Image (cartoon, rainbow, N blue to C red):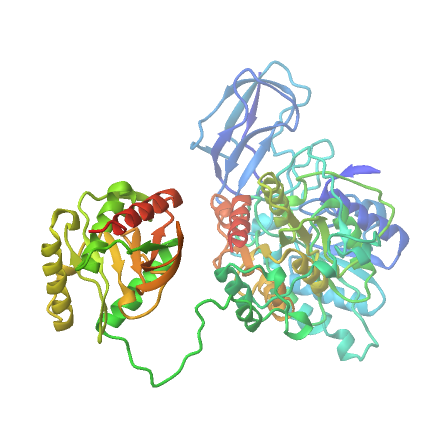
Amino acid sequence: MTTFNLPDLGEGLAEAEIVRWHVSVGDVVTVDQPMLAVETAKAVVEVPAPFSGVVKTLHGQPGDLIATGAPLIEFEGDTRSPPATKLPTRAPATRGADGADGADGTERAPLHAQTADSGTVVGSMPTTETELIETALAGGRPSHAGNGASSTTSGQRLRAAPAARALAKKLGLDLTSIRGSGRGGVIVVDDVIAKVPTTAQTPGFTGGEKLRGLRRAMAQSMSLARDNVVNCTLFDDADLHNWREGQDFTTRLLRAIAAGCKAEPALNAWYDGNTQSRRLMTRIDVGMAVDTPEGLIVPVIRDIAGHSTSELRDEIDRVKRAAHARTLTPEDLRDVTFLLSNFGMIAGRYATPVVVPPAVAILGSGRLSRDVVAARDGVEVHLRTPLSLTFDHRCVTGGEAARFMAAVLRDLEKDN
Amino acid sequence: MAKVTMIEAINRAHAWEMRHDPAVVVLGEDVGVNGGVFRATAGLQEQFGKDRVQDTPLAEGMIAGMAVGMATQGLRPIAEIQFMGFIYPALDQIANHMARMRNRTRGRLTCPVVMRMPHGGGIHAPEHHSESLEALLAHHAGLRVVCPSSPARAYGLLLAAIREPDPVIFLEPARLYRLVKQEIADDGQALPLDVCYRLREGSDVTLVSWGAMVTETLRAAENLERDGVSCEVLDLATLSPIDHETILESVAKTGRLVIVHEAPRNCGIGAEIAATVAERGLYDLHAPVKRVTGYDTIIPLSRLEHDYIPTTARIMDAVRETLAQ
């Protein structure tokens, strides 16, 4: 058995703390193999095996303080070389942390010829068996290497001011599609701005009057309709030749709308584009466009299918008066399920009326006129009214709209 | 060809040049009998004698001063400062004499000195043994500052440094001294100074690093490649003067730059690179330049030093942040 004592680690210190053991009892160690790490007041030092042998006893656990010269490891049997009393890799110490040339810095022991070299007197040198394979191109540039083209070609270079890059990213514009006007072709902020699509950029002016009330409401609801509805308009003419005397044109229109809705309930509905949900309405509440000096107003005639002609007429008269007197209540304007625009009382034959959501259809009636028509036995002159049906094609099919129109025409063409 | 560690490569560069140029002498603490605390000069005194490999007292100012005297009188001294943290007493001789001898004498005298010293931490060493002070030296006109990151570059750049007619501060990343082996021809072939070395070609981001941090930087680049990120890695190698052209060309290609150094951030060499890219390459940038550096505090002792030294993970985070812009 051979005992190996903690050597003087070359720093003139009295003791060291065991950091960790690299070997266990029974291990076969070879000379210079690291056996444990100890920490002195100055550094963590690896202690190599002084000779080859089998470990019999380890003195101390990690965290224990071992005095210099105290037993550290016992080896079984004889060892090839006598136990060292000094660290084999003993080397001159470096100076202490205070930089003073203490006694520890004055010793100069020659390197032990037979022992391995830990490569340092302080700390520990990380060592691996890894072989470094690298290609190091001096200058890093093709011109230095002389190997011709690389991926750096000036043609691909896109130079842009950082603010221009940021703006282009914000606007979702592709910088490669922008021509730089800055020095050397640099893309500057103005180049990006010039590429912004010119939507909604109308020339401004001063001295305008701010829209208020009905006109402002119209601007808003029409913009909303424009932004949301997919308008499709169908035109036809209703032949009123067979009408008896004293027919009320507007109530006949309402009755025809009711007939149309009965034939195609899809046109008496609400549609929510955000949720893509449709609600078919059972009652037909027609919003009637009323032209007033202040602007367009659309009061509602409730349940047109559930009222008599005279009741409808009374209601029409009431809402028209109220519209002009501006005495309509919010209740009179709410929850329209179908829209009617009787612009023909003024002028105009056909139009492309605008559907205002959530309603999905609007019927426009144009100016009544006496038209030359081809009758069965020759040319005749009939009283007719042009009709324009706009529907929201997101939720109303062309077939539904046409059948609606057909039902409207059938009803309008009845004699009373 | 032999596979050698960086410390062996440095040793062989000394030996080659001493065999071929009798003016080359070595001086420093423990460089002779002991062969240097890291064994950089092992065997040189036996081979070339005590006149050419001289042990000095522990007096860095004297070592640098001796080197100035030797150099102006026709020798080519290689002086070792045992750790970079010990350089302060030598700064007077280095800054006030070595760096300006050519200027002072209007070119009549030059100082072909190499000041070698271990650089950086990561070896569990005590205080004053882990410093990265390259910026301190790079700030002085008249000094060239070089820092290899592989055995081959240690060999080739040290030979170039010895052959330079002007002083070179040669920083040796202590952590890399024995970390890996590399084949070198040991044929006396120097490598060019004042240029970057491109270690990896890439198209998404340029990573510039030097010394021991090149290891972490390359590892980060390898990891990122698995995520489809193509990193170009440049080893700065000569820290002063900086090869800005190569960096600018790389940034023009990738549009993104991450600088990695172990030294503190404040007024570090990374700041100089970032500033130059801002001045000359701003319009090529797709994202702000990022730096991954040590912190602006004293590098901690062994148990905490790895919290200070930039890690592969920190480098990868910085690259990803840059790419997210």
> Could you tell me which residue is drawn at 73 percent across and 47 percent down?
B40
Does any portion of residue B50 appear in the rendered image? yes
> Could you tell me which residue is drawn at 82 percent across and 61 percent down?
B76
Q: Position of residue A127 (x, y in %)?
A: 64, 36
Q: Position of residue A336 (x, y in %)?
A: 21, 54
> With respect to residue B113, does B12 lie above or below?
above
Does any portion of residue A395 appear in the rendered image? no
Q: Position of residue B74 (x, y in %)?
A: 85, 66
Of A248 and B42, the residue lying toward us:
A248
Q: Position of residue A188 (x, y in %)?
A: 58, 71
Farthest-out residue, top: A77
- Specify the quadrant of the image occupied by residue B268: bottom right
Q: Classify the position of the N terminus of chain A by image quarter.
A: top right
Of A238 and A235, the residue lying toward us:
A238
Taking the image as shown, residue A257 lies to the left or right of residue B84, namely left
Taking the image as shown, residue B203 lies to the left or right of residue A378, namely right
